[in-house]
Amino acid sequence: MLIGIDDTDSPAGMCTTYLGAVLARRLIREHMRVREARLVRLNPNVTFKTRGNAAVALDVDGDPEKGFALACRIVEELADFSCEKTNPGVVVVESRLDPAFYQKAVTDFCEIGEATELLERSGARYRGWKNRRGLVGATAAVASFLPDKTFEVLAYREPDRWGTPREVDKESLFAAEEATFPHTWDTVDLANQVVVCVPHTPDPVLFGIRGESPAWVMTARAFIESEKPALEQIWVTNQGTDAHLLPGACGHLSEGLSYRVRGTVTGRPATGAGGHVSFTISDKEREVRCMAYEPTKNFREIIRALVPGDEIIAVGSYKKESINLEKICLVVPARDIRIQAPFCTACNKRMTSAGKDKGYKCRKCGAHEKDPEVQEVPRTLSAGWYEVPPTARRHLAKPLCRGVPDGG
Ligand code: ATP
């Protein structure tokens, strides 16, 4: 059977993966075999999410009736029902559900009714609490197929420590990264010298190490010195796989969906209030704005180095009429030609426009010049992919250390 669970946590605590890890141990205690613990991230733009829009599925050999009862019991015991946004869902099926539902949940938005209709049609055992929204994620988890997958070992804290500062040795995290990157990633952010894998929220997670195989995440994990975890679980995940991306075209993007969009940079990127950098790309017919927000840190330097005419692939979620960049590919770099008013050689001052098609004029001595100054500036960016730093990476975004996406 597959047991899917979602929506058990709140900003004040709990974590659906912790609940899944505890359930796995209870199932084993009941002599059932847990073949796989799976953690799927769904559309990162759903507003109902608490943090990372995660749902879990356990692949178990055992009696489905008993599995369902144990899963419901653990949700009643551990879920944070006090929060209005916590609406748990539990699903048990005897074979994987239609993957189209997972595909929609990771790339788009699903209605609760779509989940229950599929569950009814499939003869699934299921239960939803409160508004039952968790059934969307729980159904997606037991419908998930992972053509590409990664792994994460999550260490969870003793319950009496929840909400207190985490004791994880920073140096040991940097040592883990140094010894295992690029087979593991996002443990720390070297360029920004910050720890990425230890959360700051009051949930049970102590740290999580992401990587390409169970062996690599456990190799990295062995470096880490910390308070004693209560339990640890290796999850099979869709994290770092770009599963949320759809092919997209300028002018044909939907709010809250994530895309790869090809276009030509139309103007020089501008830095606005708060340090956010924006520019526009066009496919000759339509335009779309792209944004690199302040938390993307040094990635903004790359974006500022784009010039009009650059042909790029912009990757990210379309929100409030702009693509929030996760990475870009500079496919064909343009020549950086800068056209300015010429200098007046007599006064050593820059001239100003004398009017449309009238050339330039020195405001001091009245000299005229027909042509502007044309200068080609050497490019600092070469063709290739560029990404946000680990500190700004979304769970589903595929890090470039795993290989470059198609089409660039
Ligand atoms: P948790 O650790 O509890 O899973 P979270 O940050 O992952 O926390 P949830 O509390 O699960 O967020 O909240 C997300 C809610 O949105 C869940 O009820 C889930 O069923 C629902 N959901 C997830 N993806 C979609 C989607 N694509 N369309 C509609 N609802 C969705």
Image: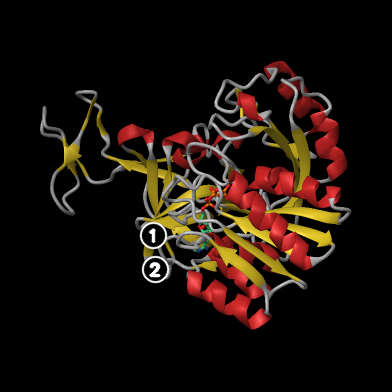
Q: How many labels does the image show?
A: 2
Examine the rendered structure and indicate whether residue 289 appears above or below residue 91: above
Q: In which quarter of the image is residue 66?
A: bottom right
Q: Decide: marks 1, 2 in contact (CB < 8 A)?
A: yes
Residue 270 appears at what percent x and percent y?
35, 41
Three-letter amino acid code at disc 1?
Answer: Val
State the residue in front, 292 or 130: 130
Q: How crowded is mark 2: few (under 14 residues within 10 Å), some or many (20 or more)?
A: few
Is residue 105 visible to the viewer in this orientation of the structure? Answer: yes
Residue 364 appears at what percent x and percent y?
11, 27
Question: 137 left or right of 12?
Answer: right
Q: What element carries label 2?
A: loop
Disc 1 and disc 2: Cα gap in Å? 7 Å
Is residue 56 visible to the viewer in this orientation of the structure? Answer: no
Please give the name of the residue rendered at 67% of the width and 74% of the height, measured from the top-left corner: 124
- Position of the C terminus, as image quadrant, is bottom right
- Position of the N terminus, as image quadrant, is bottom right
From the image, tell me which residue sits under label 2.
251
| Colouring convention used in this rendered image of the protein | secondary structure
Examine the rendered structure and indicate whether residue 50 appears above or below residue 36: above
Please give the name of the residue rendered at 59% of the width and 65% of the height, measured from the top-left corner: 127
From the image, tell me which residue sits under label 1.
288
For residue 393, the mark is: none
Name which of mark 1 and mark 2 comes first in the sequence: 2
Examine the rendered structure and indicate whether residue 217 appears above or below residue 238: above
Please give the name of the residue rendered at 29% of the width and 43% of the height, measured from the top-left corner: 372
Q: What element carries label 1?
A: strand
Question: 347 left or right of 144?
Answer: left
Q: How crowded is mark 1: few (under 14 residues within 10 Å), some or many (20 or more)?
A: many
